[in-house]
Image (cartoon, rainbow, N blue to C red):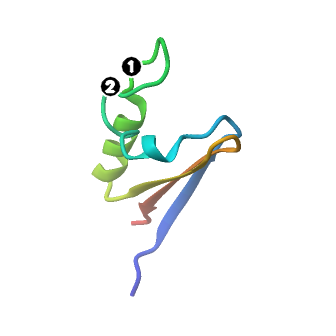
Amino acid sequence: MEQACDKSLVKDTGMGIEKERLASIYEPFVTTKSCGTGLGLAVVKNLVEAHCGKIEVDSVVGEGTTFTITLPND
C-alpha cells in the first residue's frame, strides 16, 4: 500500500532555470543574484528531507519554474 502524502506546488512565471544549472540549485552558496547568499534552496531541501519528503523542480527558460514538495501524511 502506498503511503498517503501531501503535495505543495510553488510556481512562478520568471525567467526559468537553465538545464545546466538545475543540478547545482540545491548546493549551499550557489547563487546568480548579486546580493543573495545561495542558502535558500539548500535549507528547504534539507528541511523537506528531514521530514522524509522530497522536492522536485520543473523549469522552462522564459516561462518559469515549479517546485513540488511532497511530504508524508502521517
Q: For this view, does 56 lie left or right of residue 13? A: left
Amino acid type, residue under disc 2 in the picture:
Phe
Q: Residue at x 30, y 31 (%)?
A: 28
Work out whether 29 lies above or below 19. Answer: above
Q: Which residue is mark 1?
A: 37
| Vertical order, 8 against 13 (above or below) | below
Q: Residue at x 71, y 40 (%)?
A: 13
- Ranked by sequence position, the earlier of labels 1 and 2 is 2
Residue nearest the viewer, comparing 36 with 71: 36
Q: Residues within 10 Å of mark 1 (few under 14, many from 20)?
A: few
Give the number of the disc on residue 17. Answer: none
Q: Is residue 67 left or right of residue 47?
A: right
Q: Residues within 10 Å of mark 2 (few under 14, many from 20)?
A: some
Using the rendered view, name the quadrant where residue 14 is placed. Answer: top right
Q: Amino acid at mark 1?
A: Thr
Residue corresponding to mark 2: 29
Q: Quadrant of the C terminus?
A: bottom left
Position of 51 relative to 16 (above/below): below
Left or right: residue 5 compared with residue 66: left
Residue, x 31% and y 59% (percent of image)?
Answer: 52
Pointers 1 and 2 in contact (CB under 8 A)? yes
Across and down, in percent, residue 26 comes to: 36, 40
Q: Residue furthest top?
A: 35
Instruction: Tell me what residue is drawn at x 63 percent, y 43 percent.
Output: 61
Residue at the extreme front of the image, as rendered? 20
Q: Could you tell me residue 51's position as x and y percent?
A: 32, 53
> Nearest the camera: 31 or 40?
31
Residue 45, percent across and down? 36, 44
Q: Secondary structure at mark 1?
A: loop
Say left or right for 50 vs 5: left
Closer to the camera, 7 or 36? 36
